Image (cartoon, rainbow, N blue to C red):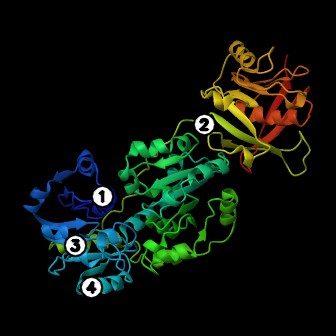
């Protein structure tokens, strides 16, 4: 029985542990949740048999497996086995438990009938410390608690060897860091208290050095609609944000991430328990059982200043030794590590009156992520700086670029605005210093485009590149062709240079040569320049004057 998409996700993982003699599975949706819209149809869409409530009540089940606890489970016929739908029992949800003391999943109203009869035959625990919580809420149920471990955690740990594959799925390039932002639901969630965090991250983290991934609780998607949620994040998606959409695997995001910015959700403690660095973006400890493992993690974690310099905070945190080890965190909430699948199967089969099997269940990997991406970025703020010695034209040029839709020009006074030919919003091209045609053109078409965007007679090109009062402030147009790139500076007080390069990376060629031109470096003779988007990944190209 399931009530929400969160519980469905958990039950489907628990089901994996029941092999090789997998039982006949029937699903039934318990009505009443505000976050269950479309749940039944989704269950049928992924190929499961869905029973109506009436059909379920008329059926005798060997086992009723649920990742939640409610009195409705007692209305069905069969041995009830309940498990948490997150990492243990941490969260206080008075609206559903009628208690501000007992965690959801262990509250008296969830585990007992109105007459006081205990509903579950088995209450799955991930750690023995959780038995004390049960003893405080329903003392008579303590004998039904079984420390199984956490099948989701064990699966995540076993799948860490696939980290590079998952990073490829999220389009994380070598040398990039993946920043995962996670959010539970409710007033203290990351997406509730730090609504601007995603946009600020995208605007402050150079896009060639960082990738930002967003993993949100299913209830966030269900409270509105997946289309509406993604529509609200349109600018962020078009600025490079990657989203784990609803009803798709989320675990790979934690495995792939270099650092997680999160709140008081289970994902935070899963991430910390596998060694992913963690910063607390929103403090929701008021919703947690005091001194629970998740509450202690939130208390120990470094708090992210959302209004501060996010890049510096992230880089400083990654450069320092961890404040706590992954094993220390994991040991507070997960026991029976590596054994939970076998333990769970034995418990479920026992509840059905069956002996366990001699063959252990086969661990299956975390499923491949199915991320959502936005449109490609077509306008940027870009900076180009030389190495420490500052000898213009002889040192490596370090390029950093930020998506123009979300980047704030005030943060980068030395930045130039760059637009691609594919940018269709005129407001994004007006005033750009550098104009690119990243799609290859033949020479005739390329020269025609350069003339059109730069202009030759009026003082403003059609894309708004202003003709300077001095040569060194000139605008630039660059296009790709079969042999490399052509660079054309706007005509100012004197003709600007016309250059050819041997690189197909029109962005780097344009920005680097604009930097040289802006700094007064002569471009009237051939040269070679080194550049990089990320430290340690040095590239170079040759350039020469052309007629």
Q: Which mark is residue 142?
A: 4
Distance (Cα) linking label 3 and label 2: 55 Å
Is the residue under label 1 in contact with that under label 4 (CB below 8 Å)?
Answer: no
Circle 1 or circle 3, nearest the eye: 1
Q: Is residue 18 above or below residue 387?
A: below
In primary-sequence order, the first of circles 3 and 2 is: 3
Residue 4 in the image, given as x and y percentages of width and height = 30, 58
Q: Residues within 10 Å of mark 1 (few under 14, many from 20)?
A: many
Residue 307 in the image, given as x and y percentages of width and height = 64, 59
Disc 2 on helix, strand or loop? loop
In primary-sequence order, the first of circles 1 and 3 is: 1
Distance (Cα) linking label 1 and label 3: 30 Å
Distance (Cα) linking label 4 and label 2: 56 Å
Q: Which mark is residue 377?
A: 2
Number of numbered discs on residues:
4
Residue 159 in the image, given as x and y percentages of width and height = 45, 60
Q: Residues within 10 Å of mark 3 (few under 14, many from 20)?
A: some
Decide if residue 281 is on the left or right side of residue 384. left
Q: Is residue 171 above or below residue 478?
A: below
Residue that appears at 65% across and 61% down: 314
Distance (Cα) linking label 1 and label 2: 36 Å
Q: Which mark is residue 4?
A: 1
Disc 4 on helix, strand or loop? helix
Q: Which residue is mark 3?
A: 356
Is the residue under label 3 in contact with that under label 1 (CB below 8 Å)?
Answer: no
Disc 3 on helix, strand or loop? loop
């Amino acid at each position: 029985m399931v009530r929400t998409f969160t519980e469905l996700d958990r039950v489907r993982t628990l089901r994996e542990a029941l092999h090789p003699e997998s039982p006949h599975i029937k699903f039934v949706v318990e009505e009443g949740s505000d976050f269950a819209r479309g749940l039944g149809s989704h269950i049928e869409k992924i190929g499961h048999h869905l029973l109506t409530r009436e059909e379920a009540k008329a059926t005798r089940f060997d086992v009723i497996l649920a990742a939640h606890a409610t009195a409705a489970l007692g209305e069905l016929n069969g041995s009830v086995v309940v498990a948490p739908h997150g990492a243990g029992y941490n969260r206080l949800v008075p609206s559903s438990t009628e208690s501000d003391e007992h965690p959801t999943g262990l509250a008296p109203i969830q585990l007992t009938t109105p007459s006081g009869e205990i509903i579950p035959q088995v209450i799955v625990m991930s750690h023995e410390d959780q038995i004390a919580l049960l003893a405080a809420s329903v003392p008579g149920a303590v004998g039904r608690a079984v420390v199984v471990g956490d099948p989701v955690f064990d699966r995540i740990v076993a799948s860490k060897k696939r980290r590079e594959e998952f990073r490829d799925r999220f389009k994380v390039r070598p040398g990039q860091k993946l920043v995962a932002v996670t959010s539970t639901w409710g007033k203290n969630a990351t997406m509730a208290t730090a609504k601007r965090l995603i946009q600020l991250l995208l605007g402050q983290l150079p896009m060639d050095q960082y990738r930002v991934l967003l993993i949100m609780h299913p209830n966030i998607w269900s409270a509105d609609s997946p289309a509406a949620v993604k529509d609200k994040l349109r600018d962020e998606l078009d600025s490079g944000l990657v989203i784990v959409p609803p009803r798709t695997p989320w675990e790979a995001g934690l495995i792939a991430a270099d650092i997680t910015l999160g709140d008081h959700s289970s994902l935070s403690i899963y991430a910390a328990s596998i060694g992913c660095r963690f910063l607390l973006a929103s403090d929701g400890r008021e919703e947690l059982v005091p001194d629970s493992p998740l509450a202690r993690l939130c208390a120990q974690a470094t708090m992210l200043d959302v209004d501060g310099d996010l890049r510096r905070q992230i880089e400083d945190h990654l450069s320092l030794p961890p404040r706590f080890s992954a094993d220390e965190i994991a040991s507070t909430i997960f026991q029976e590590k590596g054994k939970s699948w076998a333990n769970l199967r034995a418990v479920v089969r026992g509840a059905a009156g069956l002996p366990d099997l001699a063959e252990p269940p086969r661990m299956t990997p975390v499923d491949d992520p199915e991320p959502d991406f936005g449109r490609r970025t077509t306008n940027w703020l870009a900076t180009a700086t030389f190495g420490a010695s500052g000898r213009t034209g002889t040192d490596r040029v370090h390029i950093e670029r930020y998506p123009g839709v979300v980047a704030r020009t005030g943060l980068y006074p030395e930045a130039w605005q760059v637009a691609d030919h594919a940018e269709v919003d005129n407001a994004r091209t007006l005033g750009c210093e550098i104009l690119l045609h990243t799609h290859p053109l033949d020479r005739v078409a390329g020269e025609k485009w350069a003339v059109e965007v730069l202009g030759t007679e009026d003082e403003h090109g059609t894309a708004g590149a202003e003709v300077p009062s001095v040569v060194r402030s000139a605008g630039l147009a660059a296009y790709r062709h079969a042999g490399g790139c052509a660079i054309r500076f706007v005509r100012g007080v004197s003709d600007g240079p016309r250059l050819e390069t041997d690189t197909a990376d029109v962005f780097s060629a344009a920005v680097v040569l604009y930097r040289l031109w802006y700094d007064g470096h002569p471009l009237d003779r051939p040269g070679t320049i080194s550049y990089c988007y990320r430290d340690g990944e040095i590239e170079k190209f040759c350039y020469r004057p052309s007629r």
